[in-house]
Amino acid sequence: MLSVVKRYITNSAEAEDTLMEGFVKVFAKLDQYQGGGSFEGWIRKIMVNEALMSIRKNKNRYPVDIDVAFDLAHPDETLMQLGVQEIESLIATLPTGYRTIFNLYAIEGYSHAEIALLLDISEGTSKSQLSRARAQLQNQLTALQNERLEFCR
């Protein structure tokens, strides 16, 4: 569950605190688990919500301006050559707001409407932040590809 929390909170101490708060909630609400889904999924949802609550405590985490961004619809060779840890490292470098929305949308599978409700933002802000996260990841992939090309020369 720590890896789930660290997708949203990159500061190790803050992530560990959030994890502990999440487990306190898990144990406090254990009687509410109905067995309708997987136990792991139930805990994961609590951990994601705890991470989001932790992020909400700091209102400066969400950039507000909107701009046009690239799309990662066609992954290139560089992306295909990256390992899971390298991809997670790239995602971890995103600003908190971008990373949070990217994780919720691309990894957890939430819709923009659901993200807007969870984070108390507009759907447009969710879409904008996802677009900006993708643009930043695309820029990082391009830089990585250029580095690898230079290394091969």
Image: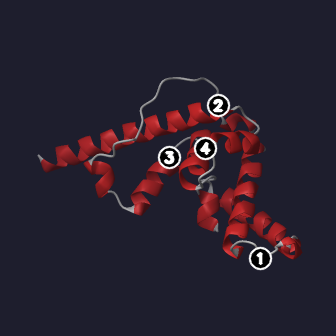
Give, as a three-letter code, the residue at label 3.
Thr
Report if the CB atoms under discs 2 and 3 are less than 8 Å apart.
no
- Mark 2 or 3, nearer chain start: 3
Q: What element does badge 1 sit on?
A: loop
Q: Is residue 81 left or right of residue 29?
A: left
Which of discs 1 and 3 lies nearer the camera? The answer is 1
Residue 101: mark in rendering: 4
Residue neighbourhood size for the residue with mark 1, other residues' Cα within 10 Å, grouped as few (<14), some (14–19), many (≥20): few
Residue 125: mark in rendering: 2
Q: Position of residue 67 (x, y in %)?
A: 52, 23
Which residue is drawn at the image coordinates 68% and 74% (left, top)?
38
For the residues marked 2 and 3, what is the alpha-carbon distance in whole angstroms? 20 Å
Which residue is drawn at the image coordinates 84% and 75% (left, top)?
30
Give, as a three-letter code, the residue at label 4.
Ile
Residue 35: mark in rendering: 1
- Mark 1 or 2, nearer chain start: 1
Quadrant including the N terminus: bottom right
Residue neighbourhood size for the residue with mark 3, other residues' Cα within 10 Å, grouped as few (<14), some (14–19), many (≥20): some
Which residue is drawn at the image coordinates 35% and 43% (left, top)?
141
